[in-house]
Image (spheres, grey):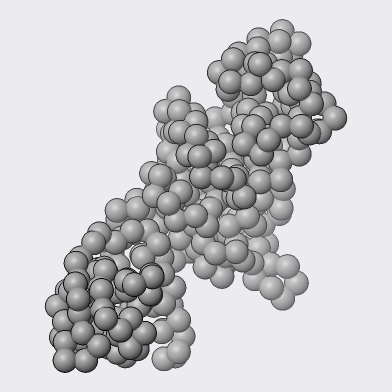
Amino acid sequence: MQDPVIVEGLSRCFGDLVAVHDLSFEVHRGEIFGMLGPNGAGKSTTLRMLCGILDPSGGRATVVGFDVGTEPERVKQRIGYMTQRFSLYDDLTVEENLRFYAGIYGLSRRERRARVGDALERSGLAARRNQLSGTLSGGWKQRLALVCATIHEPPLLFLDEPTAGVDPVNRREFWAHIHRIATGGTTVIVTTHYMDEAERCHRLALMSRGTLLDIGSPEEVIERRRIRIALVLSPDVAAAVEVLRQHPAVDEVAPFGDQIRLATLGGIDPVVLAHDLLDGGPGVRDAREIAPNVEDAFVAIVHGEARQEEHG
């Protein structure tokens, strides 16, 4: 069975600006696929091309069996799409918004009645069905937006930084719902710059300045970097940071209160290195190794790119 998303050499330019350059990847059925990167990395531009909203400048992409360049309207009818600024109508009630979007997606009157009632119950919005959407809290608006984007039960759901500005509790509840959707067989593609959200995805595409830096599961992305992390306590944090920063095996030194987060490259033991560099100088009160995370891996990739450019 064909993957729901196949991307081959996809690019997009805005005049002289290359927003997305030569992307190639596949998204497998039923997975949560995260696109991770800072603002300006090209994540949203890529999503808009895959949704049939923007025409590619080069390459091609097939989404749910249709070419985004030649069949964008077919793509739009078969996907769900939600952004942090999803267009709810504030002067419509919760139920009226659901009925409106069900109609946009072409559901019959009988289907609309059944889907809307079921969606209200499953999402916990039934008690708010007659409340004006504009009076909902941010978390409930987000939940309603997600239900509107999936009212037609699409096989593929696009989420463009959907939790930006949402509090941590609602973010967790939102992600629990996303995993329930994926467990039901829907493929989900989500863009984010939250590293903890990236770790909730099955696979990640790490992007910077419009290019694909790496792709794989969170564990694979971390493992390929060969970075090691230690938390170091020193009597003189500022002096210790300056000493550690000079060593070529050190990828990053970041003070966190009275601790230093030390990242080393090439599998070098950061605890041993901290003692070697700081004993007899600023000193080490304590040092212990911890597991690296996706943020550590992403920072290491970006630093590596910067070093390559610096050295030509």
> Which image quadrant is residue 18 in?
bottom right
Q: Position of residue 134 (x, y in %)?
A: 78, 33
Q: Residue at x 40, y 62 (%)?
A: 295
Camera-side residue: 185 or 236? 236
* Residue at the outermost front position: 235
Left or right of 293, for residue 152: right
Q: Is residue 211 visible?
A: no
Indicate the quadrant containing the C terminus: top left, top right, bottom left or bottom right.
bottom left
Q: Residue at x 42, y 38 (%)?
A: 31
Q: Is residue 302 visible?
A: yes
* Residue at the outermost top position: 110
167 lies above or below 25: above
Q: Position of residue 184 (x, y in %)?
A: 45, 24
Camera-side residue: 143 or 75? 143
Q: Residue at x 26, y 79 (%)?
A: 234
295 lies above or below 126: below
The mark total stands at: 0
* Residue at the outermost right position: 91
Camera-side residue: 126 or 10? 126
Left or right of 164, for residue 27: left
> Which image quadrant is residue 91 in?
top right
Camera-side residue: 255 or 175? 255
Q: Position of residue 148 (x, y in %)?
A: 67, 29
Q: Residue at x 60, y 64 (%)?
A: 39
> Which image quadrant is residue 231 in?
bottom left
Indicate the quadrant containing the N terminus: top left, top right, bottom left or bottom right.
top left
Left or right of 296, for residue 65: right
Left or right of 208, for residue 253: left
Q: Position of residue 51 (x, y in %)?
A: 65, 44
